[in-house]
Structure formats: C-alpha cells, structure tokens
Amino acid sequence: MLLHQVPERPLKHPKVLANLLQNVLIQPSESGLRQPLPTPSPNSDQSAYFYQNQKIPPNPPPINHFSFEGKYRYICELLLSQTRSRNLPTGLQLHAHITKSGLGTIPLVSHYLINFYSKNELPLLSTLVFEETQQRSATTWSSVISSLAQNELPGLAIEYFRRMLEDGARPDDHIYPSATKACAIMGRSDVGKSVHCHVIKTGYEIDVFVASSLVDMYCKCGGIVDARQLFDEMPDRNVVSWSGMIYGYAQLGEDNEALKLFKQALYAGMDVNDFTFSSVIRVCGDCTLLELGKQIHGMCFKTSFNSSSFVGSSLVSMYSRCGIIEEAYTVFHEVPLRNLGMWNAMLIACAQHAHTNQVFSLFNKLQTGGGTVKPNFITFLSLLYACSHSGLVKEGEFYFELMKTRYGIEPGAQHYSSMVDLLSRAGKLQEALSIINRMPIEPTESVWGAFMTGCRIHRNTELAAYAADRVFQLGNVSPGLHVILSNSYAAAGRYEDAARARKMLRDQGVKKETGLSWVEEGNKVHTFAAGDRGHARSKEIYEKLEELGEEMEKAGYVADTSFVLRAVGGEEKQQTIRYHSERIAIAFALIVFPHNDRPLRIMKNLRVCGDCHTAIKFMSKCSGRVIIVRDNNRFHRFEDGKCSCGDYW
C-alpha cells in the first residue's frame, strides 16, 4: 500500500481555449438558484457562561465543584470557546491545567485539544497531544488526520491513516474525506486508489460525503476519467461532488465539459457554493467568455456569494482576462474581507494591464492594512512582472531583495526567471547572464527562455545561440524555445540559421503552435488564423482591411518586414505581415461593432509581433476606437495611436 510521504507536485494551470461550444450562455429560466442556508451561530448561552470577552472568567467555579463528568465537560466547553476565537495564549493555559489535572487521558478532551491546535495552525502540537493520548478512539484518530490534512501536511496525514489501520481502528465517514484530501494535496492518485479500496472494503462507497471526497481527489490528481466514472455511479450527489467534477474539468482545460456540467447542476436544482462559482468563473476568464461571466456574476449576487473572497478573486481574474480592468477594481473594493488570493489576483491584473503604479500602491496597502494577510511568493512574482514590463530595473531589484530580507521567502525558479526577464528586456544581457550563472538552483527552461527573449529583442544572436545550447542540454524542451531562437535569427536577417532552428523542431516531431486571434460576439466566438479566408464574412473583412490599410499609410504607417520570418521577396513580405490573425480579428470587430460606445476586445494565443503592435496603434487612431488586445503575455490598450505598454512588452 502506497501510504507514505511523497514530494508534492506543482499545481496545473488551465490552457487557453481557441474553439468553444456554441450557445453556452445561461438563459434566465435556468438560473433560479435556491438561497444558501445561513451558517448557524455558536450557542451564545453556553459561551456566555463558560467564556467572557475572550478570557477565562476571572472567578470560575472551583474545579472540585463539578463531578468528574462535569469537570471534563467544563474544560471541553472552554477549549471550544478558545478554538472559535483562535485565542492561543488562553488555550495554552488550559492545556497546562488539563495536563496537571490528568484530564488529558479522556479521548473527548484530547479531541478538543487537537482541534484547538489545528485551528490555530499548529498541527505538530496536535500530533503531540495525540501521542500522549492513551485511549485512542475513532474521534481522536479523525481529529489528528484532519488536522494534518487541513494544515497542508498531507504526507503525515497519510502516515497516521496507515497507523490507524495497523492499530485496528475502523475508518469512518469523517476520516476518509481527510485521507482523500491529503492525497489530493500531494497529487497522488495511486495513494488515493489505495484509500478508495479501503472505502469499498468497509462499505462506505455509497456514502455521499465519502464518494464526493473521492471524486474531488481524483479530479485534483488529474484522474478525470476515474472521477467521472465514480460521479456517474453515485446514487446521490451533493455540492462537493458537482463542484469537484467542474473543478477537475476546468483544471485540465476541458472548459466546455466544465460549462456543460455547471448547466446540468443548475437543471438538477443543485445548490452551488463559492467553490463551484469560483471554478466556473475561472473557466469564463480562461476562455474570455465575458457575457457568460457577467451572468454568473449576477447569480453570485442573487445567492450572496459575491462577498466571498474566494469568488471575488475569480471575478477579478475573469474581468481582467476579458480586458475590463475597471470591473476588476470594482469587485475588489466591494469584497469586505479579502484573502491573499484576492490581493494577488488584483496585483496580477494591474501588472498585466500596465497599471504599474497601482501595483505598488496595492502592495503598500497589503503591507500596512492587510491585517493578518502577508505577501507570498505569488505576490512578489506580480511585483517583478510589473517591473519587468515597465523597464523598472531598480524597483525590481528592490522587491527581489525585500522578498528575502523582510519576508524570508527564498526565490524560486520563477522569481529568477522574472529577474532575468527584467534585466534582459532592459538590455542588461550580461547582468542577466550573471544572475543565471549564480543561481543556487539549476536554471530551468523558463529562465533560459526569458534570457533568449531579451536576446531576440536586442538582436543578440550570439548570446541567444549560447543560451539555446545550454537549454537544449536539459533534454526535450518546449517548441516555444525553438521558435524564439528561430525568430532571433530571422530578426537579424540570418534566414538560413532560422530555417535550421525550425528544422530542429520538425525533426523532434513537434509542431509550432498556430497563431490564433478571436473575438466574442454575443454567444459566439469567432476565431481567425493568419491569412484566414474561411469566415462567412471574409469578403467584408478583407475589404475593411484594405480600406483601413490605405488610411494607415496616409497617416504614416510603414510596414516593418523584419518581422517576417522567412526569406521571401519584399512584396510578399508585406502581404504576409498585413494579414496576421489579430489584424483580421480587428477588421471583423469593426464590422460587427460599428458604434464607438465600446472598446474592441481581441484575444490572441501568441505574442503580438512588433509590426502588428505598430499597425494596431495606427488602426486605433484611424478608426477612432479603443482596441484592447490580450496576447499570451499581457494586455495592450490602444487608444488614439498609443499603447498602454509604452512600447515595452
């Protein structure tokens, strides 16, 4: 049985969809959700008797005043009060009294102590209490396993689950969900299957809570087929099983399946929770389905989940990814209690939309007014990203050091990648290379990719080739690095070297990702590739492109053919670059959205080339429209011939 501690693996990130199902919008008749039940409040009468103002009563009844049963029940009530209030100092005093009076031998008292330390995020103290407990019941086993799983110590949780089985204790409907949660955190479906076997042996596979936890575990481990089979076989389903399946599809990039399942949940009359909303809103953001996202936002208002920081962080990301940073700000300020995920979502949104000063301002507010919320490694990635894409080298170096000195966060590969990106984009290639050579960890593909991107921008093919040699030693690398190297050679006019780089890609049997741009129109997504003439309105699109091209040339636009990556004639170069996918998408958007009351929103799966970036500035000026383009790296807001990125991307 694979019940042992294993290293954790990184979370997966959803992919960007290019083609989507039609008619995914939810009609008003489908959105009738039941109101969530209010959370029951603690028993105020008992709390008032045993616990006043977050302190032990100054004159509590003498302990001898109670019978033996009364003593430990009195202690349990006090512990419960301190657990609810997270009052660690008073709880420690109670623990000392329990030890002194010998009440720690009672399983129920041990259970409350373990739970107290768990809620105060001290799981190892929970294990110490457990080890001192002589009579271990299913309740105490459940408490310690739950404590470890909830506090992100999954390996230890599984170890205690194994010990419980060896001890002859029988798992129940409280223990199994904690064990499956630990497996999900580790990303170990093989361990989860071992737990699943025990579930079947003990007859708990028909329990809706246990089965739902298994569905959630398989989804989070990437075992979507096993999860769906179990989900379909469940006689009853609850919000956990529905939410787990939706989350699983969303994490694997199966966005259409996630949306279909969400609609099925609504048809089935299932109450959805903040986790369900968060998952499906993230799908809308990844797919840039703005209209559907707005409808689901309305459902959140109807069910009062709009005030949840969990839902709020997803809404911030969704509106940001759809190019509406103003709505992201509104959502952020409307949520009363913000967790770190929401702060990070807003920081990332501001960084991607080139609101650099707002990034710094938000970070200062987080430091001074975030309460118990403290920055983490994602927070500093957002700061470094903002600095990198604004050319703020000194500021980036400051935050890189602050992360280590004030917050004790050791930089990971992503932080080093951001620093290399910052220096490389600023033209400080030797300094960037020096950081790579001094890294305490092995440079990853992303680190070398950031360096090669800087080499391409500054047309230093020698250093790009050097970096390529180093990164290819890592083994199989992503097609993107081959493309960067090829583009670097092509930008310098070294077309034979560029062709060789592309041949290396073909020899490995890897295809370069096709550049696509898409526009959302109502409940439809229109997708275009370079030179695409397959659209039903293709004739109108190309007429609009010709018309706009003439106006752009009169305004001073001259095509930069150095961004053509093949050795072809001058006229062919101009024709090639004129019909890139983003330009076709913009022409289509101008046709279907002729009025000036809304920005044009274009999404693209690859980086916008330099000439298209220049061309779109002219398009915005000649058409008098605001054009928002999201590429695979950031947002560009083109208005009156200028871009929000300041030509630094």
Image: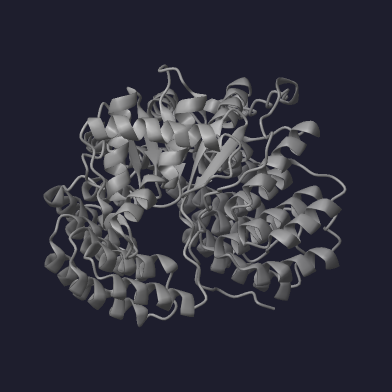
> In this rendering, would 138 be left or right of 129?
right
- Relative vertical location of residue 276 with respect to residue 622 in this rendering, above or below: below
> In this rendering, would 466 be left or right of 612?
left
Q: Position of residue 108 (x, y in %)?
A: 66, 51
- Relative vertical location of residue 501 with respect to residue 134 in this rendering, above or below: below
The residue sitting at 32% across, 71% down in the picture is: 498
Corner quadrant of residue 451: bottom left
The residue sitting at 40% across, 65% down in the picture is: 480
> In this rendering, would 223 be left or right of 559?
right
Please say whether residue 274 is visible from this viewpoint: no
- Colour scheme: one colour
Please say whether residue 511 is visible from this viewpoint: yes
Q: Position of residue 649 (x, y in %)?
A: 26, 48
> In this rendering, would 427 be left or right of 273?
left
For the residue pair 484 and 385, the one nearer the viewer reads as: 484
What is the total number of numbered labels drawn onto the structure image? 0
Q: Position of residue 159 (x, y in %)?
A: 60, 71
For the residue pair 106 and 10, the one nearer the viewer reads as: 10
Corner quadrant of residue 132: bottom right
The residue sitting at 22% across, 46% down in the picture is: 648
For the residue pair 127 and 561, the one nearer the viewer reads as: 561
Q: Quadrant of the N terminus?
A: bottom right
Q: Position of residue 492 (x, y in %)?
A: 21, 65
The residue sitting at 60% across, 46% down in the picture is: 19
